[in-house]
Every structure is written in structure tokens, then in C-alpha cells.
């Protein structure tokens, strides 16, 4: 199990931090939201490719990652940077304890959502994915992070089908954020729109997969984005929805 877990981490390091990683495109995308001196939260930091981008853009970063091996990798990469704080917790709707369902071969899809695990079972494109371990994890909230570190300019949320739960722990609007969506769990994205609309009037855009490019030339309403996501082909698999109070 340990060797399989390490193999999964090394795979993530190659994919997200290797020579083919789209660093320039990523920086160009996040430059819209992250200015020098800004505060950014990375919720579900994984191996820290977004942390690296935010730091290249001059931001201070709070990185939250519950998986022990990934937390260790983040410390090796960013632990000496005084402008990065790495927290070995998960973010949820309330503080407490939850089980993390771990995919040791592909840790990027480990999740706190049991529904997400069930939605992946038998879904095209998810063949062979197995959540073969679970570990108890302490959870904190976005409100708790804000109380400790301040209001961020940007929050990135990538937690495999638990994004709506993360947003339920936020009681005030932030200037801009992103949340991952997957075509096997479109209901999660719809719940995110509902939560954000209760906080403020946001406008939305979309980046598919790891393209690091926005799909639309203009920022859409929540109704427009929800309609678009409802019709995205299943094989698109995933992407990130960007929400902002001030269209760029």
C-alpha cells in the first residue's frame, strides 16, 4: 500500500510539476485574480502547482491539503517559503472530523464525498478508479481560515465533489474564487451556484480540463453558466468554474 501511495504521489508530481506543466498559461489565467501582495487560499492544494503559480505572481498563500503524503510533498517544495503556510486539514461546512476516501493510485481524486465515490462507480472515463482506504481528517471552514488569516482576494477549491460543502462554510463574499466541476457530479456545481448567489451577485466563466484558458469572452450569470454546464458532454470530464464580483 505504501509503495502504491508513493507511486501515486510521484505520478502527480510528474503531471502537475513536471517539464510539460503549463506554467505560463496558468500564471496568465490567475494573474486576472491574484496581484502582488494579495492573499490566496488553495483548498485541496495537492502537490502545489497552484501554490507555485500564486507565489510566482507575488501572493501570500494558505494551502490546505489533508493527505499525509501530499502534505509532506508540499512541505518539501514550499516549506521554507515564509509566505506559504501549509495546513494538514480538510475544509468543510463545519469544524469537526470526517472520513477522507483515499485513492492511493491516483491521489488527485481522493475525496470527502462518499456520493462522489458512488457517482464514479461504473461511469465512463472513471474505469479502474478505486478508493481503497479511508482516514479520519480534521475539518475547518473557510470562515475559520478568514478569521485567522484575513479575507483572501482569491480562493481556489478543488476537492472532488465536495466543493458545495466547502462553500457552505463561507458566510461572506470574497472577490473571486474557482471551484472544480465534474460531469459525474453536476449537482455539486448547481449547489455551488445556489450558495454563491446567497452571498453576492457573482459572474462566471469556465476553464475545461487543464487548459488554463477561459471559454467565454464575457462573464455569464449563474443561470447561463448552470445551463452551459448541464449540456457539457460527459467526456469533457472536469474543469474549473471561475466566479468574480467584478468581471475582468
Image (cartoon, grey):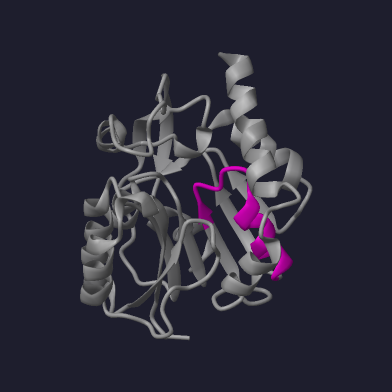
Given residues 59 and 21, the one toward you in this image is: 21
Which percent across, then down, holds residue 116? Answer: 29, 38
Which percent across, then down, holds residue 52? Answer: 69, 57
Is residue 239 found left or right of 87 in the rendered image? left
**Image quarter of residue 22:** bottom right
Q: Measuring 32% from the left and 80% from the top, which residue is drawn there?
A: 220
**Residue 152: in sight, yes or no?**
no
With respect to residue 151, does 141 lie above or below?
above
Q: Farthest top residue?
A: 1
Q: Measuring 39% from the left and 85% from the top, which residue is drawn there?
A: 218
**Residue 201: in sight, yes or no?**
yes
Is residue 96 found left or right of 37 in the rendered image? left
With respect to residue 83, does 118 lie above or below?
above
Given residues 192 and 24, the one toward you in this image is: 24
Q: Is residue 51 in the magenta section?
A: yes
User: Bounds of the magenta span?
Assistant: 42-57
Amino acid at each position: 500500500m505504501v509503495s502504491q501511495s508513493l507511486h501515486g504521489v510521484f505520478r502527480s508530481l510528474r503531471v502537475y510539476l513536471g517539464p510539460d506543466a503549463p506554467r505560463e498559461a496558468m500564471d496568465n489565467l490567475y494573474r486576472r485574480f491574484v496581484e502582488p501582495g494579495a492573499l490566496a487560499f488553495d483548498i485541496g492544494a495537492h502537490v502545489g502547482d497552484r501554490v507555485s503559480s500564486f507565489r510566482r505572481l507575488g501572493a501570500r498563500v494558505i494551502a490546505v491539503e489533508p493527505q499525509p503524503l501530499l502534505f509532506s510533498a508540499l512541505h518539501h517544495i514550499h516549506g521554507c517559503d515564509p509566505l506559504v503556510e501549509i495546513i494538514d486539514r480538510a475544509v468543510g461546512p463545519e469544524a469537526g472530523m470526517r472520513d477522507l476516501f483515499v485513492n492511493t493510485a491516483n491521489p488527485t481524486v481522493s475525496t470527502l464525498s462518499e456520493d462522489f465515490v458512488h457517482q464514479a462507480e461504473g461511469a465512463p472515463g472513471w474505469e479502474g478508479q478505486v478508493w481503497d482506504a479511508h482516514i479520519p481528517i480534521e475539518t475547518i471552514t473557510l470562515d475559520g481560515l478568514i478569521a485567522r488569516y484575513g479575507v483572501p482576494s482569491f480562493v481556489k477549491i478543488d476537492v472532488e465533489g465536495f466543493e458545495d460543502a466547502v462553500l457552505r462554510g463561507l458566510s461572506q463574499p470574497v472577490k473571486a474564487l474557482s471551484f472544480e466541476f465534474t460531469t459525474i457530479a453536476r449537482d455539486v456545481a448547481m449547489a455551488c451556484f445556489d450558495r454563491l448567489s446567497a452571498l453576492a451577485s457573482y459572474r462566471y466563466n469556465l476553464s475545461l480540463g487543464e487548459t488554463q484558458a477561459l471559454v467565454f469572452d464575457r462573464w455569464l450569470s449563474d443561470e447561463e453558466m448552470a445551463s452551459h454546464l448541464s449540456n457539457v458532454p460527459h467526456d469533457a470530464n472536469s474543469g474549473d468554474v471561475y466566479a468574480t464580483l467584478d468581471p475582468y
